[in-house]
Image (cartoon, helix red, strand yellow):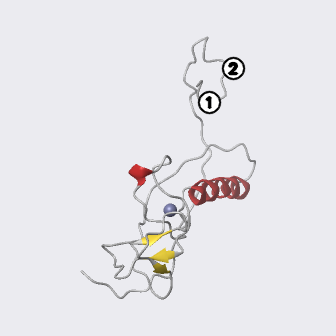
Amino acid sequence: MTTTNYLQLMSPLRCCMPGEFLQEGFCPYRPAWMMPGQSWDRPGLFCERHRPFAAVPLSGDVAVRRLELRTAIYFASIKGSSAAAQQEALHTLISLVERAGGLVNLVDSSSVMGLWRVPALSASQHGQTGKGSG
Ligand SMILES: [Zn+2]
């Protein structure tokens, strides 16, 4: 399969070093080098650290696969207005996604006011921050 479509929206490219060789599971660095013959099914983009000997400087068009995940993400907010709540949530989401190497393209957002029945906590759960106890 070949494609000649130019992507108009793309997250920053990332080094293609296989994750099993890396502590984080993937290399987070931007590529500066590419293997000759790089194609959509042979990614072949590498950072300075993982550059193969035969790599050439990254230039021109590169074939990439862009993933688009359509999902609903919910945040609880303590903001008084819908606009402030959505701005806070979007800022948080963008920060998290960019740290993971992605790009947020907000399609739609909404907020709703409602009641939430708080689950009963055991005595040992009172006072925890919700970030886990280790
Ligand atoms: Zn790398």
Q: Position of residue 90 (x, y in %)?
A: 64, 58
The reply to whether discs 1 and 2 touch (Cβ–Cβ < 8 Å) is: no
Q: Residue furthest right?
A: 80
Q: Which quadrant of the rendered structure holds the N terminus? A: bottom left
Please, what is the three-letter code of the amino acid marked with disc 2? Answer: Gly
- Residue drawn at x 50%, y 58% is 27
- Residue drawn at x 62%, y 59% is 94
Relative horizontal placement of residue 32, taking residue 21 as reference (left or right): right
Number of callouts: 2
Say if 91 sits above or below 127 in the image.
Answer: below
Name the residue tied to disc 2: 127
Q: Who is closer to the viewer here, 19 or 84?
A: 19
- Residue drawn at x 56%, y 63% is 29
Please, what is the three-letter code of the amino acid marked with disc 1? Answer: Gly
Say if 132 sits above or below 85 in the image.
Answer: above
Name the residue tied to disc 1: 130
Q: Residue furthest top?
A: 123
The numbered mark at residue 44 is: none
Q: Position of residue 127 (x, y in %)?
A: 69, 20
Q: Residues within 10 Å of mark 2 (few under 14, many from 20)?
A: few
SS state under label 2: loop
